[in-house]
Amino acid sequence: MAATRMPGQRWYTPYLFALPALVLFGVFFAWPAVTAIQLSVLHYDVVSPPTFAGTDNFTRMLGDERFWKSLLNSVLFLVGMFPLLVVLPLLLAVLVNQKLPGIRTFRMLYYLPVVTSMVAVGVAWEYVFHQQGVLNWLLTAFGLLDQPIQYLLDPFWALPALVLVEGWKSMGFYMMIYLAGLQTIPTSLYEAAKVDGAGAWVRLRRITVPLMAPYIAVAFTMEMLDSMQAFTSIYVMTRGGPQDATLTLGYYIWSAAFEHYEMGYASAMGLVLWVLMIGMALLNHRINKGQAVVA
């Protein structure tokens, strides 16, 4: 059945409303994507004219140990962020969804890091992780450490430290996503479960988690994309060190482009990262097919 038009309405009216969004899509997504594809087959150092490289940039990646190291670090970053951004925020959301004294103040304070600059957060946490910082002082005072650790200068501890910082900063955002989902669950389900003698753990496992599955899928997708693109905390706190222990793919792409001016190679790695993120998002969608929610 053909759609009816309002009196005086022209055929192009709907497209005029969509035009601002289409312009933004073209400027900030389509055009950069096409440019990146073009640069990925070129040798270009900004100063000299670009020359055709064919598949040289992609062949170089196969033998680049730093590329594979950065990819591994990105995967480890993703795995480390999973409990901090997918699991723990759900438990916190269940807590703050209760009618407890001062719960609104707790929500506000827990969300505060989300709106704080990552640069400020990184600088503050550098003092926490310092050899004479708060963390070492507490662990030493309780007898959990014999001597202080230089967390950001230790190849073993540097990446977990960054994961902790990124998770701490973003946890409140994911908690609010879950909180919105929890408030759509009828309270009658929990009341009926209590009448049947179900405890808090059983209610969480049998009611909350199954009904929150669409929100968990959304949170997992966002966590994957955020983890693979991690950059600011690494730039502020470690610059990819020590010994490339925190060199993620996102930071390596930036370094190749803006420190070494290898725009073609950086674009090729950017395309690989883009394909990886799209692939992970599609895989997660397929696994959770039919459970998506409208953000």
Image (cartoon, helix red, strand yellow):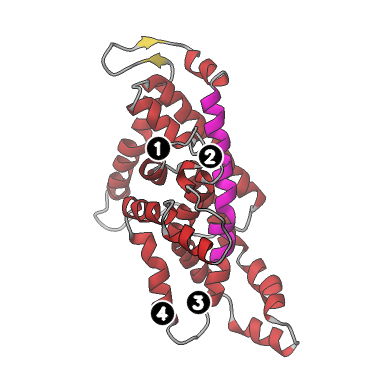
Q: Are marks 1 and 2 in contact (CB under 8 Å)?
A: no
Crowding at label 4, few (<14), some or many (≥20) Cα neighbours within 10 Å?
A: few
Query: How packed is label 3: few (under 14 Cα within 10 Å), some, or many (20 or more)?
Result: some
Residue 104, numbered circle:
4
Residue 257 numbered mark, or none: none
Q: Report the mark closest to the observer, 1 or 2.
A: 2
Of the two numbered discs 1 and 2 on the same chain, state the one appearing first in sequence.
2
Q: Is residue 184 visible?
A: no
Q: Mark 4 or mark 2: which comes first in sequence?
A: 4
- Which residue corresponds to mark 1? 239
Q: Is residue 82 magenta?
A: yes
> Which quarter of the figure has residue 258?
top left
* Disc 1 + disc 3, Cβ < 8 Å: no
Which of marks 3 and 2 precedes in the sequence? 3
- Residue for badge 2: 155
The mark that comes first in sequence, 4 or 3, is 3
Name the amino acid, label 2: Pro
The Cα atoms of the two marked residues, 4 and 3, are separated by 8 Å
Magenta-tinted stretch? 65-89
Q: CA distance from mark 1 to mark 3?
A: 36 Å
**Amino acid type, callout 4:** Arg
Q: Residue at x 41, y 79 (%)?
A: 104
